[in-house]
């Protein structure tokens, strides 16, 4: 075989290899997971550092890769055209076009990019040193190209500077990644719900997760000591609000361990406990407005080293209490121990309907059954019916909102105590 022909074919083969490298590298570096590479960089992985540095200068990266890719593709096409013209005459131009198009598309575009998409992280780490060298070599040329392109865009009044992503866009991207992970990995469903709940902490207010004042266990501070001790011991809670004159007038929060320790010391010392000042043992109440977000309240709990707060409205009236456990349950779900009162409220039926207590929150229902009931106008199932109907329904009445059927099963005074919710057939 003619040595020149053999050398030219070898050069074309090398050019195609470079083309495949450039195409695959571009796809791998743009598709690689940013969170994973960030974690690897923080762990000391030097190649991950190189990948992240390359991606921070995306225009230079893409400009250098495209310059290199087009350079080798054009050179390979020129060499192939020359060979085929010598072998077949003028028709060699057509043959070279068909041949090089097939080779470039198949072996230099589709195959390397398909592999890069399937192994983006691993390939990005592998090619990082070579791509860094390419960017360094073509840097002057890529800077010139970027300058010319930016001037053309400026003449056409086209804005290309994206800057940093807005926080809302970043959060949407994160939520989308979490949802995609839940869909592709069924075992990660609960973890996905937890991660969504963490992102929602800044949007949920304390009045949506608090224990309503009608359900708060509180003790009259003026009761005899033995009655207070008995109330504390029989309560499933370790922190008990103390009130005086009226239940809404909270004067302190009594910790069961503090009370029992003082009671034990008084009994061991003087043998008397009648004059024990219970109110003096309580810590001052911490009042927080109902509009406080769970994220801010969680941070406040950490700063103050407290787990218990009194929720009040804009007039200072008592609404309920919120604890650190309430916020944690908003993230991980119910946390129960041997002293907790079993929670009622959600009873799925074989027909697909769900019987719920009126104070069950819409967020709990949405998370448990993957529903999409709105919770911006009301926090509970009963509140949603009251909000939508604009009246206090009677037992037996039926309403349909957002495709769901709400049947009132129980009412006590002005409170809806039980409802039967039937979701749409496609839920």
Image: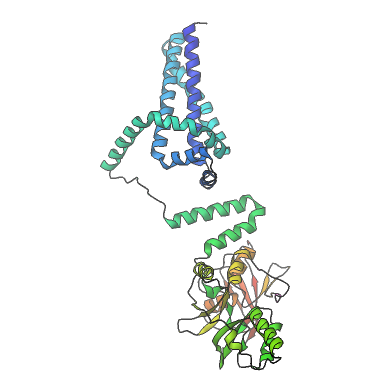
Examine the residues drawn in magenta and state their main secondary structure.
loop
Residue 415 visible at all: no
Q: Which residues are magenta?
A: 334-342
Number of marks present in the image shown:
0
Foreground of the two, 336 or 112: 336
The x and y percentages for residue 258 are 64, 80
Residue 320 image position (x, y, % from top left)? 56, 80
Tell me if residue 352 is in the magenta stretch.
Answer: no
Q: Determine the residue positioned at 57% across, 54% down.
A: 179
Q: Is residue 327 above or below residue 389?
A: above
Residue 338 falls within the magenta-colored stretch: yes
Between 296 and 342, which is closer to the camera in this rendering? 296
Viewed as shown, does residue 319 lie left or right of 154?
right
Q: Is residue 56 above or below residue 383?
A: above
Tell me the quarter of the picture where residue 178 sits.
Answer: bottom right
In this rendering, position of residue 14 left or right of residue 264: left
Q: Point out the residue furthest to the top here.
A: 2
| Residue 320 visible (yes or no) | yes
Q: Is residue 55 left or right of residue 408?
A: left
Q: Nearer the viewer, residue 212 or 236?
A: 236
* Colouring scheme, one of rainbow, by chain, secondary structure, one colour: rainbow
């Amino acid at each position: 075989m003619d040595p020149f022909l053999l050398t030219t074919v070898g050069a074309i083969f090398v050019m195609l290899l470079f083309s495949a490298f450039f195409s695959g590298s571009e796809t791998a570096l743009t598709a690689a997971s940013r969170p994973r590479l960030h974690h690897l960089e923080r762990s000391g992985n030097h190649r991950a550092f190189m990948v992240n540095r390359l991606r921070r200068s995306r225009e230079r990266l893409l400009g250098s890769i495209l310059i290199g890719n087009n350079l080798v593709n054009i050179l390979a096409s020129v060499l192939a055209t020359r060979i085929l013209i010598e072998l077949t005459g003028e028709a060699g131009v057509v043959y070279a076009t068909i041949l090089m198009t097939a080779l470039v598309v198949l072996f230099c575009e589709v195959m390397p990019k398909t592999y890069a998409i399937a192994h983006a992280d691993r390939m990005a780490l592998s090619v990082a040193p070579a791509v860094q060298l390419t960017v360094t070599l073509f840097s002057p040329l890529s800077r010139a190209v970027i300058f010319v392109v930016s001037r053309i865009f400026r003449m056409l009044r086209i804005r290309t500077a994206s800057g940093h992503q807005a926080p809302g866009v970043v959060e949407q991207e994160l939520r989308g990644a979490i949802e995609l992970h839940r869909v592709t990995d069924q075992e990660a469903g609960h973890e996905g719900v937890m991660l969504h709940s963490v992102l929602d902490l800044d949007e949920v207010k304390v009045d949506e997760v608090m224990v309503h004042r009608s359900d708060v266990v509180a003790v009259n501070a003026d009761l005899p000591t033995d009655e207070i001790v008995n109330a504390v011991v029989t309560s499933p809670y370790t922190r008990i609000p103390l009130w005086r004159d009226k239940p809404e007038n909270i004067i302190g929060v009594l910790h069961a361990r503090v009370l029992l320790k003082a009671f034990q010391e008084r009994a061991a010392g003087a043998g008397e406990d009648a004059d024990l000042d219970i109110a003096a043992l309580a810590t001052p109440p911490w009042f927080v407005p109902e509009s406080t977000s769970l994220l801010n309240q969680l941070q406040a709990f950490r700063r103050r080293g407290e787990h218990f707060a009194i929720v009040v409205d804009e007039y200072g009236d008592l609404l309920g209490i919120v604890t650190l456990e309430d916020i944690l349950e908003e993230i991980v779900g119910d946390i129960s121990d041997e002293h907790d009162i079993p929670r009622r409220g959600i009873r799925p039926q074989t027909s697909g309907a769900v019987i719920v207590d009126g104070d069950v929150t819409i967020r709990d229902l949405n998370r448990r059954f993957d529903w999409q009931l709105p919770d911006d106008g009301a926090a509970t199932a009963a509140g949603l019916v009251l909000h939508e109907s604009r009246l206090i329904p009677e037992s037996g009445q039926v309403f349909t909102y957002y495709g769901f059927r709400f049947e009132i099963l129980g009412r006590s005074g002005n409170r809806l105590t039980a409802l039967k919710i039937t979701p749409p057939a496609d839920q």
